[in-house]
Amino acid sequence: MLFWVPVPEIAAALGDLPGATVQVVSPDGGPLPASADEVEFYVPPFFPAPPAIEVIAHLPGLRVVQALTAGIDRLLPYIQPGVTLCNARGVHDASTAEWVVATILAAVRDLPYFALEQAAHRWSYRYTDSLAGKSVLIVGYGSIGAAVEERLAGFEVEVRRVARRAREGVAPVSDLPALLPAADVVVVLAPVTAETVGMVDAGFLGRMKDGALLVNAARGSLVVTDAVAAELRRGRLRARARRDRSRAAEPGAPAVGGARPPHHPARGGVDAGVGGAFARVRAGSGRAVHQRAATAERHRRELLTCHRCYGPFGRSSSIEA
């Protein structure tokens, strides 16, 4: 089985896999290697440029595409019949959850202000809020949401959860309008789907209580930027977001009157997360190599069982992360 992987580190992790031939290939729009007709397992780069995504539709022998991210919305349009697309669900839970908790604490305790004062050599005093006693609403309660809740456990907060479907301890998305007014912190973790794009709009924000904090750890397309900017200009809400490299407008996204929410690069913990992805790719790859004689249906059902797979025999997700 021929693998295309984006970096030497992944190639090294797969190098001694029986029956596998691994090449480091990261399509950039130039001529493809002669092996393009033979590659069966393709791992796009962590932040794939358009050529690295579009090539998926032009690999005739392709059987599996393994994303290094939990989100797969950019890849889905290029998946051909018979090709299985697997995400990296769970790989980045820890790093994303750490970012969310750090961001909440920084906002509540006003740490950026004190960092600037320290840099200016000023000994400044200022009262800040406290996280203890706050209500945190997690919108899109999947594996990352659970990781966020685990890390909030020691902060004496009340956690409420929302997902597409109701289950024990998790409210359905239809309850979101009733839950937003009581939340001090709203953490958005939903994946990109037709239902979630633009979900954080003026109506969503209008239901949030005065002074509440919005933390978007999901894709930028879930948020209506102008609506957030309007609330920030009014000073009614606070907001923090990770920079979304998948959005064409970044880094020059609209900034209205300086009201653009503070953002941070979305690569927190990437090295550790991708290291976990290497292990998962290897585990799934081993199964693929040893099942080559199996039927296509069985292959698609069993390959990379540690991931959520999308394809003829796979499954898809909506608001659950």
Image (spheres, rainbow, N blue to C red):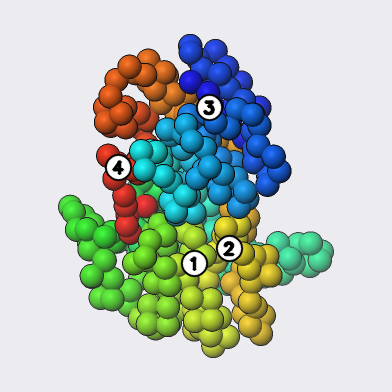
Q: Which one is in front in this view, the residue at disc 3 or the one at disc 2? A: 3
State left or right for residue 238 relative to residue 167.
right
* Residue count near mark 2 (Cα–Cα under 10 Å), binned few <14, some 14–19, many ≥20: few
Q: Is mark 3 on a helix, strand or loop?
A: loop
Q: Of 317 and 83, which appears nearest the observer?
A: 83
Residue 130 seen in this snapshot: no
Q: Where does the image place residue 88, in percent across and percent down from the top left?
A: 44, 40
**Location of residue 158 (image quadrant):** bottom left
Residue in view at x 42 percent, y 78 percent:
201
Mark positioned earlier in the residue sequence (4 or 3): 3
Identify which residue is drawn at 44% across, 24% down: 285
Q: In this view, does 215 lie above or below 48?
A: below
Rate crowding at label 1 as few (under 14), some (14 to 19) or many (20 or more) other CA atoms within 10 Å.
some
Question: Which residue is tagged 4?
Answer: 312
Residue 297 x/y as whole percent: 27, 31
- Name the residue carrying label 1: 221
The residue that mark 2 highlights is 247
Q: Which of marks 1 and 4 is in front?
A: 4
Task: Kindly identify which residue carries mark 3.
Answer: 38
Q: What amino acid is labelled 2 in the image?
A: Arg
Q: Please name the amino acid that badge 4 sits on.
A: Pro
